[in-house]
Amino acid sequence: MQSPQVLDHFQNPRNIGELPAPAIRVDVANPACGDMLRLSVRWEGGLIAETAFQVRGCAVAIAVGSMLTELILGMNAHDLRRLQNSDIEQKLGGLRPESQHAAVLGIDAIKAVLKILK
């Protein structure tokens, strides 16, 4: 059984979709399980002002995408660099070992955004 937070974000995902240009859009995938995450962020004044996501994957990957869009809103590049898999797992009330790959997918998306911001 997944945590209540995972179930909530899976059943009621937030910020689904894609932001229009000039938003930053990144696509990341986990080749082992096939999950794919597209993260869109609008950067304004050195902060993330708006976020959206799309996922093709398991329920936990959907929950990670949803929660990630809420977590990073208002963050600057320094804050993003400090995020770790464990932060995502904690915000979702913990993830079972077989689901932790989804948190890695979220961090991979953050790293891809940071590459573009450099």
Image: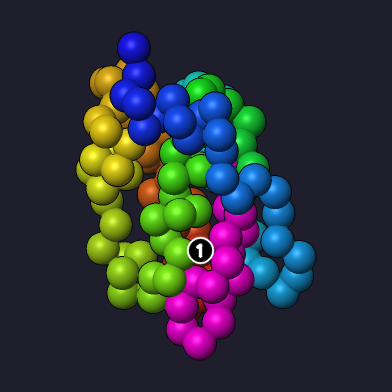
Report if residue 107 lies within the magenta region: no
Residue at the (35%, 65%) spot, across then down: 80
Q: Is residue 11 left or right of residue 80?
A: right
* Residue 106 shows in the view: yes
Q: Residue furthest top?
A: 1
Amino acid at the residue labelled 1: Val
| Callout 1 secondary element | helix
Q: Is residue 19 left or right of residue 42?
A: right
Q: Is residue 93 left or right of residue 117?
A: left
Q: Which residue is mark 1?
A: 113
Q: Bin the neighbour count of mark 1 within 10 Å (Cα to Cα): few under 14, some 14-19, many 20 and up.
A: many
Q: Residue furthest right?
A: 20
Most frequent secondary structure within the magenta stretch: strand
Q: How many marks?
A: 1
Examine the image and state in which quarter residue 54 appears: top right
| Residue 5 position within the rendered picture, expressed as x and y whole percent measured from the top left | 36, 32
* Residue 101 shows in the view: no
Residue closest to the eye, 36 or 8: 8
Highlighted range, magenta? 36-53
Residue at the (51%, 43%) spot, across then down: 66
| Residue 94 position within the rendered picture, expressed as x and y whole percent measured from the top left | 25, 31
Report if residue 43 lies within the magenta region: yes
| Residue 96 position within the rendered picture, expressed as x and y whole percent measured from the top left | 28, 20
